[in-house]
Image (cartoon, rainbow, N blue to C red):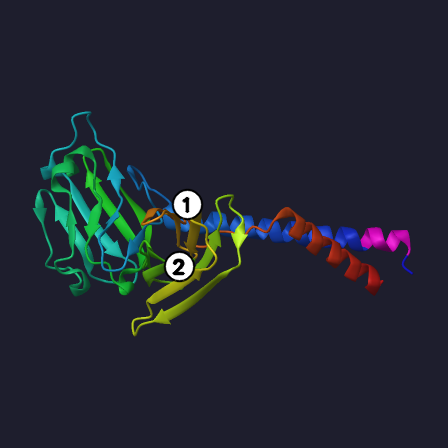
Amino acid sequence: MASLGQIIFWGMIVMIFVAAGLIILILSVSFAVQGLGGSQGTVDSNNKWPIGNLGEDVILSCKFKTSTNSGESTSQVSITWKKKGLSEVVYRYNKGAVQLTEQNPQFKDRTQLFSDAIGGGNASMLLRNVKMKDEGVYYCSVNAPSGSGTDSVKLRVAAFSAPKFKWVNTTLTAEGERWFPKPDVLWLDVNDNVLNESETRFFNNSAGITRFISSLQQITLNDSYTCIIQNHLVKAVSRATVKDIEISTTTFFSFSTAAAPPILLPQRHVLAATTSFFFWIYQLT
């Protein structure tokens, strides 16, 4: 049997390792944010972690300070968008004129700036028909009378769509036509209790896009049910109310704001894990 002094000693060792791990995690996140979003000078982005929906358009945010309240003359502003890993530009605007002779072929006829808003400090770029290979880090560089600078955004690519609901007898079915990465599907009742009377089937096409059909059994008329569809990038919360002859639905989307959001365990799980670890140390002594 270990002495009290040994238990205290090993407890302190464990606390030191835990504290060191937390410090390393905090520093890693800090350096990652600085490396991606470190705005320089007058240039900044409202959304450093945008998510593009495959096949649809996305805006890469970039803004710059103007020298006067009335804005800048576009003939004095130069804007260049580049993508990490590519030598050619994604888009270039130089003193009132678009210059695409050095544009990477991947972005041909798919990019544009908001020309009417450039004078007001808007250097954001519209990227059409998002593709999987568009994912990556983009750099927005601006040269204007107010100053110059560069900021970066990381585009993440996903596929997501609102589910379609169908009700037959006592079974409510939700079908998601296009999701990537593959999501988890969860059903809740009107009081947000998890319902286990469901079955979900997944189907992947040749491009790796997932379609799912999730069926909830033994539903009750005139009650509301929530279907949550979620991966590490996108979360869809769809509420369906089953009435006598129809289903009314609403869907809300939310998006992660970091490349790797932390996984938080409920407090009771953390305590249980800590207790088990201390017990293991105690047995070794």
Q: Is residue 197 left or right of residue 229?
A: right
Q: Is residue 133 left or right of residue 231?
A: left
Locate residue 89, reporting x and y percent: 19, 57
Could you tell me which residue is drawn at 33 percent across and 44 percent down?
Answer: 47
Give the quadrant of residue 68: top left
User: Disc 1 residue type?
Assistant: Asn
Locate residue 7, reporting x and y percent: 84, 54
Residue at mark 2? 169
Q: Where are the magenta residues, as a range? A: 3-9
Looking at the picture, does residue 97 appear above or below residue 217? above
Q: Which label belongs to residue 222? A: 1
User: Disc 2 residue type?
Assistant: Asn
Q: Quadrant of the N terminus?
A: bottom right
Mark 2 and mark 1: Cα distance apart in space: 13 Å
Q: Residues within 10 Å of mark 2 (few under 14, many from 20)?
A: few
| Secondary structure mostly taken by the magenta-highlighted segment of the chain | helix
Locate residue 147, reporting x and y percent: 24, 36
Could you tell me which residue is drawn at 89 percent across and 59 percent down?
Answer: 2
Towards the viewer: 251 or 199: 199
Q: Secondary structure at mark 2?
A: loop
Q: Residues within 10 Å of mark 1 (few under 14, many from 20)?
A: few
Is residue 210 a member of the stretch shown in magenta? no
Could you tell me which residue is drawn at 51 percent across and 46 percent down?
Answer: 192
Q: Is residue 72 left or right of residue 9?
A: left
Locate residue 107, reporting x and y percent: 18, 60
Towards the viewer: 267 or 184: 184
Please identify the residue farthest to the top as the structure is shown.
Answer: 69
